[in-house]
Amino acid sequence: FFFFQRTRWHTMSQSLLDNWSDEGCAAAISEAAASPADPSAPNPLKVVLHDLSSAVVRGALEPERLVTVLSDAALVDRALLPRVQSDLADIFWFLGLRIEAEKSDEDGDGAPKQQLLALVAALLQAELVAPELLKARLDPEMLQEAGLVASHADFHRAQVRLNTRALYTQQKYNLLREGSEGYSKLVTELAELPAGPRDGTSTRGCTRAAEVVANVQSLIGYFDLDPNRVLDLVLEALEAVPSRASHRSLVELFNPQYLPHVLGFKFQFYKGEAEATPLSLYALCGLLLKQGAVELEQVLPHLEPSLPKLREMHA
């Protein structure tokens, strides 16, 4: 079926190139877009657009012909344009890589690359492709050649700075500068967490853990609290009253990848200290293991003695 689908759309594209007509091109694009998607087969619309774009790169089709079809609202439904724009951006990226990979000393003036850039320029001039979309998909070198950025090196540096600021910059503050109101309210709220359906520890008579969990989540968002510090305080509250650990929804608020590290840090705190690790911490770890919140393999690296030492001791 994969071969049938691929052959069908490639055959249609080749037939269209051999007997070109604007109406035929628009019909092929519309039919490919309406074809049901199949995860095991190539996307029909991308196949048709790729073949048409490749024909432009080879010089077998003038860029203006393809632009004329896409810009005519009577031929191509305007509702298809977002899909066409996104697919064309991906195709331009792929064709740029292929041209660079096949580039040789005999290429001379680089006609395929110039044809591709001419197609990009024509689509930009007709406002059929958004510059912002191309800046997100194409390589910096190609963006500079297309005139979308002044310098690919400056664009790359700005992109790295933006990604670093968005993904890796952590909002950490000195504890002396950090507002304590949010954490004080958080500790008060955690003290209200019922240990059981008839527990009397809540000062306001709270019997539903969901109420406390919702309030904790609101405090994190309102005061912009550090989730790792909040998780540490949550574990402290569960350690103080182990039966509270039955409220899984509270622990599930946090990233499960961070839980073993925060729990392990608590064990590491007592490493080398005169004070022995409290039994309550072992009990909390056992409860979390029983619930499946953490795996034993995730906790073992934080415990002493290490596995190699245990093997030596029992050898």
Image (cartoon, rainbow, N blue to C red):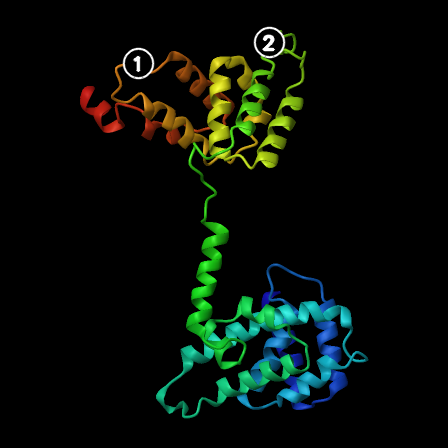
Could you tell me which residue is drawn at 61 percent across and 59 percent down? 39
Could you tell me which residue is drawn at 63 percent across and 68 percent down? 86
The amino acid on which the numbered mark 1 sits, given as a three-letter code, is Ala
Q: Secondary structure at mark 1?
A: loop
Residue 61 coordinates in the image, percent (x, y): 61, 89
Q: Is residue 33 above or below residue 260?
A: below
The amino acid on which the numbered mark 2 sits, given as a three-letter code, is Thr
Q: Judge by depth and name the residue closer to the eye, 14 or 86.
A: 86
Q: Residue furthest front?
A: 177
Which residue is denoted by mark 1 in the rendering?
Answer: 276
Mark 2, residues whose alpha carbon is within 10 Å: few (<14), some, or many (≥20)? Answer: some
Residue 176 coordinates in the image, percent (x, y): 43, 32
Q: Is residue 116 above or below residue 84?
A: below
Q: Tag 2 or tag 1, which sits nearer the N-term? A: 2
Which residue is denoted by mark 2 in the rendering?
Answer: 201
Could you tell me which residue is drawn at 76 percent across and 77 percent down? 76
Name the front one of labels 1 and 2: 2
Q: Quadrant of residue 281?
A: top left
Q: Count the labels in the image.
A: 2
Residue 142 coordinates in the image, percent (x, y): 48, 77
Residue 167 coordinates in the image, percent (x, y): 48, 51
